[in-house]
Image (tube, grey):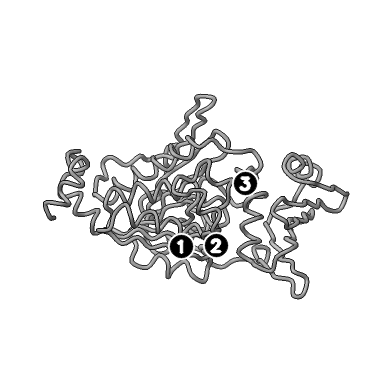
């Protein structure tokens, strides 16, 4: 390590569990952050400043004005230029630390590309806003033997855990597909400090792992509510024998069923997204009525979004996104307003 780098990271190296040896381990490490929104921007900022040698960021979305309240790397110019989040984040972070590799990739993380994106990485961090992608990351990590640091934030609540193949249970041992509340930041809001807290806990667990401080790991799924002053730790137990990921190793997200499919309807400027769970139309009509122009019938809920597109929800869990043929855009809107 050069004198210049020793000076740069001196305060971090003064922390005994890291020291000079730990700093060198960070310089030789590579991390993948999936999603560069609220959680992802905090994570990337911490890692670049901490001197992790290769920070790879993947996101399918672009910067909008509503992001600026909590997505700390972006500014109004990024909104005016409609910059992809991965591009805007890379541009900002390259100016922060030119000694490391900062890589922004504009892509939708799917079964087809997740293994390639994980290649050469030491761990994967969750910066997403939907459980469909989280289960995909979870299954791919446990198949490839990479740690997965989960995080989620909505309203005033946060949740996070580090899952390590062969050493801990996985995300599916705690949360099964279809069990999500359906609440998203765009329907019930989110407080910016909650995001910072969750991502900071994620980043700390990553630093522990990358510097081989195994004795300091937190062996629990932690949840908290900063507004109501609640905190609860669900301690890890043995992995469930019937868990399809860490038990039977079936990895269902890597072999998506028909109900997980996203289909572009040819000639209709419409994308169909099947969420895999039924909708209570009356409940969803009331929930979305606060933020959009909603029409509810016994058969469907039609939602005219301020972005210009229209969502049509059906009882069987299907959502039509009308006004676009872009699959990534459709998935973004469904994640934003419905949750996946």
Q: CA distance from mark 1 to mark 3?
A: 20 Å
List x then y, in percent, for residue 305.
73, 51
List x then y, in percent, for residue 234.
46, 36
The local secondary structure at tag 2 comes to: helix
Left or right, 216 with respect to 316, comes to left
Q: Earlier in the sequence, mark 1 or mark 3?
A: 1
Q: Earlier in the sequence, mark 3 or mark 2?
A: 3
Residue found farthest to the top: 229
Q: Are marks 1 and 3 in contact (CB under 8 Å)?
A: no
List x then y, in percent, for residue 7.
16, 46
Left or right, 191 with respect to 145, comes to right
Residue ID at (77%, 41%): 289
Q: Are marks 1 and 2 in contact (CB under 8 Å)?
A: yes
Mark 3 neighbour density, 10 Å: few (under 14) some (14–19) many (20 or more): few
Left or right, 331 with respect to 140, comes to right
Q: Nearer the viewer, residue 102 or 64?
A: 64
Is residue 197 placed above or below 324 in the rendered structure? Answer: above
Q: Which residue is mark 1?
A: 140
Residue ID at (28%, 59%): 100
Mark 2 neighbour density, 10 Å: few (under 14) some (14–19) many (20 or more): many
Q: CA distance from mark 1 to mark 2?
A: 8 Å
List x then y, in percent, for residue 317.
73, 55
Quarter of the image for residue 92 reads bottom left
Which dot marks residue 179?
A: 3
Which dot marks residue 220?
A: none
Mark 1 neighbour density, 10 Å: few (under 14) some (14–19) many (20 or more): many
Residue found farthest to the right: 298
Q: Which residue is mark 2?
A: 253
Q: CA distance from mark 3 to mark 2?
A: 15 Å
Residue found farthest to the bottom: 266
The local secondary structure at tag 3 comes to: loop
Report the number of discs.
3
């Amino acid at each position: 390590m050069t004198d210049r780098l020793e000076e740069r990271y001196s305060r971090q190296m003064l922390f005994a569990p890291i020291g000079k040896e730990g700093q060198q381990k960070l310089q030789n490490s590579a991390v993948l952050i999936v999603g560069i929104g609220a959680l992802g921007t905090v994570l990337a900022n911490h890692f670049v400043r901490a001197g992790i040698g290769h920070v790879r960021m993947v996101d399918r979305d672009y910067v909008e004005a509503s992001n600026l309240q909590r997505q700390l790397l972006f500014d109004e110019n990024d909104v005016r230029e409609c910059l992809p989040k991965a591009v805007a984040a890379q541009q900002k972070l390259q100016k922060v630390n030119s000694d490391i590799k900062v890589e922004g990739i504009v892509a939708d993380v799917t079964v087809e590309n997740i293994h390639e994106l994980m290649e050469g990485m030491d761990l994967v961090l969750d910066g997403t806003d939907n459980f469909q992608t989280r289960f995909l990351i979870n299954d791919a990590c446990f198949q490839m033997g990479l740690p997965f640091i989960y995080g989620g934030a909505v309203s005033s609540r946060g949740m996070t855990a580090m899952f390590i193949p062969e050493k801990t249970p996985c995300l599916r041992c705690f949360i099964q597909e279809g069990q999500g509340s359906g609440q998203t930041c765009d329907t019930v809001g989110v407080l910016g400090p909650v995001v910072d807290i969750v991502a900071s806990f994620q980043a700390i667990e990553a630093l522990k792992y990358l510097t081989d401080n195994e004795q300091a790991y937190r062996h629990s799924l932690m949840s908290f509510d900063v507004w109501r002053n609640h905190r609860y730790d669900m301690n890890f137990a043995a992995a469930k024998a019937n868990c399809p990921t860490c038990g039977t190793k079936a990895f269902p997200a890597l072999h998506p069923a028909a109900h997980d499919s996203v289909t572009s309807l040819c000639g209709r400027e419409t994308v169909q997204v099947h969420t895999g769970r039924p909708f209570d139309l009356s409940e969803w009509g009331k929930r979305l009525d606060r933020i959009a122009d909603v029409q509810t019938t016994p058969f469907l809920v039609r939602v005219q979004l301020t972005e210009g597109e229209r969502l049509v929800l059906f009882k069987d869990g299907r959502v039509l996104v009308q006004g676009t043929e872009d699959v990534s855009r459709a998935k973004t809107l469904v994640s934003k307003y419905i949750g996946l």
